[in-house]
Image (cartoon, helix red, strand yellow):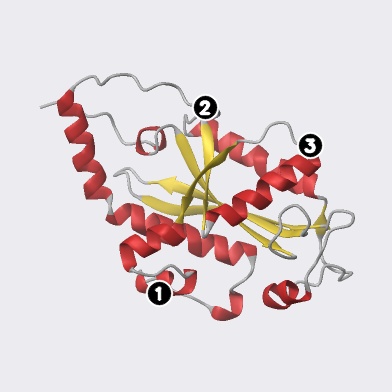
């Protein structure tokens, strides 16, 4: 029987480290609408290869000059961007602080890059990339276009694509009063991601054994921006 290497983040996700990101914004357009909150939740791996939610970091963000903020979006997330007690920091500071911790986690996990995990991940990734471009951040640890979308995973595993419904269908807790906070939504997204991955652990283990039995495979051509 072929000896399999221990499961690590690098072997589980092809060298990528999943990091959950959630943003609260002033609208739906990442080019014109304000980034108001950003949260990152790290994922931990247990000795048996299963996943669990780790540390959460969150920052309130100062709207960039000229940013649009739709009243309807602010009503949903409950953010008052101009509240005198709101501890907001500039976009660049928030990004650099999160990216510093993400790079440390990438090194600790022996991975090559982070991959964003989000609920409707294209939304969070587009706002993240737009903020990176505005702030001219040179070292973005996240893959520029690949992501893990828990709306898709929730639909596959539980038949639910809305975060609240998928969370409840997975047997997890949900507090409506706390929703639409970047930290809370990111933590529920992390819990959902870990739950789905853990339920598919047997599928992953079987695929490892199947590929190991095939022996060395033809090397795939390299893909730009994947490392």
Mark 3: give few (<14), some (14-19) or many (20+) Cα within 10 Å.
few
Front position among marks 1 and 3: 3
Q: Secondary structure at mark 2?
A: loop
Quadrant where the N terminus lies? top left
- Corner quadrant of residue 14: top left
Lateral position of residue 31 relative to residue 1, left or right: right
Query: Residue beneath label 1, please?
Result: 168
Instruction: Report the Cα–Cα distance between label 1 and label 3.
Output: 39 Å
Query: Residue beneath label 2, please?
Result: 227
Please name whichever residue, 36 or 49, is drawn nearer the observer in this view of the structure: 36
Point 61% across, 54% down: residue: 124
Point 27% across, 29% down: residue: 5
Residue 192 seen in the current view: yes
Lateral position of residue 59 relative to residue 124, left or right: right
Lateral position of residue 98 relative to residue 71, left or right: left
| Mark closest to the chain's N terminus, 1 or 2 | 1
Mark 2: give few (<14), some (14-19) or many (20+) Cα within 10 Å.
few
Query: Residue beneath label 3, please?
Result: 136
| Mark closest to the chain's N terminus, 3 or 2 | 3
Instruction: Report the Cα–Cα distance between label 3 and label 2.
Output: 20 Å
The residue sitting at the bottom extreme is: 177
| Mark closest to the chain's N terminus, 1 or 3 | 3
Q: Are marks 1 and 2 in contact (CB under 8 Å)?
A: no
Q: Secondary structure at mark 3?
A: loop
Instruction: Report the Cα–Cα distance between label 1 and label 2.
Output: 36 Å
Point 82% across, 66% down: residue: 86
Please name whichever residue, 2 or 135, is drawn nearer the observer in this view of the structure: 135
Q: Picture coordinates of residue 136 (x, y %)?
A: 78, 36
Q: As displayed, is residue 30 above or below residue 138?
A: below
Q: Picture coordinates of residue 171 (x, y %)?
A: 35, 72
Q: As displayed, is residue 224 above or below residue 55?
A: above
């Amino acid at each position: 029987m072929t000896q399999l290497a221990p499961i690590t983040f690098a072997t589980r996700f092809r060298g990528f480290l999943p990091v959950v990101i959630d943003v609260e914004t002033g609208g739906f357009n990442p080019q014109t609408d304000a980034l108001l909150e950003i949260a990152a939740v790290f994922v931990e791996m247990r000795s048996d290869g299963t996943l669990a939610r780790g540390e959460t970091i969150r920052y309130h963000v100062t709207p960039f000059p000229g940013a649009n903020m739709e009243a309807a979006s602010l009503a949903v997330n409950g953010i008052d961007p101009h509240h005198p007690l709101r501890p907001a920091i500039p976009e660049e500071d928030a990004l650099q602080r999160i990216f510093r911790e993400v790079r440390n986690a990438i090194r600790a996990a022996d991975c090559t890059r982070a991959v964003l995990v989000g609920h409707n991940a294209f939304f969070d990734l587009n706002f993240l990339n737009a903020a990176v471009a505005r702030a001219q951040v040179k070292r973005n640890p996240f893959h520029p276009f690949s992501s893990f979308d828990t709306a898709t995973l929730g639909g596959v595993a539980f038949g639910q694509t809305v975060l609240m419904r998928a969370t409840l269908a997975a047997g997890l807790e949900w507090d409506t009063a706390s929703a639409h906070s970047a930290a809370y939504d990111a933590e529920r997204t992390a819990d959902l991601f870990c739950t789905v991955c853990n339920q598919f652990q047997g599928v992953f283990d079987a695929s490892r054994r199947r590929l190991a039995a095939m022996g060395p495979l033809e090397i795939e051509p390299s893909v730009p921006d994947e490392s």
